[in-house]
Amino acid sequence: MILDEGNQSSVTTFIFLGFSEYPDLQAPLFLVFLTIYTVTLVGNLGIIVVISFHPKLHTPMHFFLSHLSFLDICCSSVFTPKLLEILVVEDRTISFKGCMVQFFFGCAFVITEMFMLAVMAYDRFVAVTNPLLYTVAMSHKLCILLVAGTYTCGGICSLTITYSLLELSFCGSNIINHFGCEYSAILSLSCSDRYFSQMTYLVISIFSETCSLLIMLSSYVVIVVTIIQMPSTGGLRKAFSTCASHLIAITFFHGIILLLYCVPNSKSSWLLIKVATAFFTVVIPMLNPIIYSLRNKDVKEAVRSVINSKLLSQPI
């Protein structure tokens, strides 16, 4: 819908194209995304519950892991319900305000998770390089401050980018060639000067990506050097196992982000952008609990004990 105000018109409603160019895939995609979303909710909520109620998991590493699971739930819930809706109904509209709200929260949770992964890398750095003083160095107060810092950075960065989008005028087409309010898709509809918004997005993207990657790379360089210098094979194996799941999560997360940065915003690349965004916002939040539960011995033992206690408590 376009609202006329004097000589100027402004878009009040956007229409998602989603995957409408593939009508035969609408139903299969709905079932696939619904299954993934269900697994995401169950898996991440399961990790949060197990960590909360199992005393052995009340450690800094699992404290950060519970917040990562929370962020995965939030990130997936920002986009997936609307994606499921536009796959089964003909009305694929979203209000301008609703679009900006979706973008804000999606952007905030992604940037927060980016910094959370960096905090988790620092946590592994302290655990491997200074294991005897790990619980002292990573005090509960410091953990809370680090988590609060990630949420604050994510919120401020997202608010700044969202403000830059609100400064734009949308007076042309209102069709978003995407399944959600993704930055490049929204920007392509603007009919005003995009320089301020593009520079804001570029500066914040470079800042957040560079800071998080530098923290992670420097942490893991020291971790690798420390592991190599360990005299015992058992210590090396244990140190590597505590970092492997985090490295896999980092690879998936930043790999997709860098792919989205490198894809040109041309008509021929919109399908790749949508697929990469779907993998980033829908699939990765499902993979993280699987990766951590399979690679983390303490989590597996806690889940097993919770299941066994529930089964044993059932009357025969």
Image (cartoon, rainbow, N blue to C red):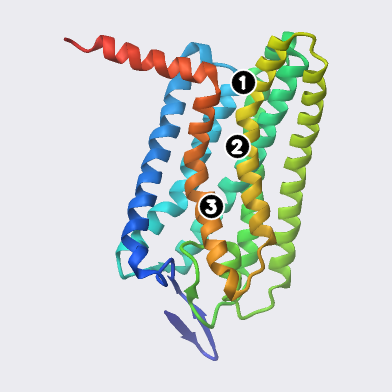
Q: Is residue 148 visible?
A: no
Q: Residue at the location (68% across, 21% down)?
A: 240
Q: Secondary structure beneath disc 2?
A: helix
Q: Amino acid at mark 1?
A: Pro
**How busy is the neighbourhood of tag 3: few (under 14 within 10 Å), some, or many (20 plus)?**
many
Q: Quadrant of the N terminus?
A: bottom left
* Contact between labelled residues 3 and 2, with CB atoms less than 8 Å apart: no
Question: In this orientation, which residue lies closer to the viewer: 209 or 253?
Answer: 253
203 vs 46, left or right, is right
Of the numbered discs 3 and 1, the one sitting upstream in the chain is 1
Find disc 1 in the rendering and name its residue: 60
93 vs 100, left or right, is left
Question: In this orientation, which residue lies closer to the viewer: 74 or 221?
Answer: 221
Instruction: Say the numbered circle drawn on residue 170.
Output: none
- Residue 18 picture location, percent across and down: 44, 66
Spatial separation of the CA atoms under disc 2 and disc 1:
18 Å
4 shown above or below 266: below
Q: Amino acid at mark 2?
A: Ala
Find disc 2 in the rendering and name its residue: 249
- Residue 244 picture location, percent across and down: 64, 28
- Residue 94 picture location, percent across and down: 41, 67
Of the numbered discs 2 and 3, the one sitting upstream in the chain is 3
Q: Quadrant of the C terminus?
A: top left
**How busy is the neighbourhood of tag 2: few (under 14 within 10 Å), some, or many (20 plus)?**
some
Q: Residue furthest front?
A: 233
Find disc 3 in the rendering and name its residue: 106
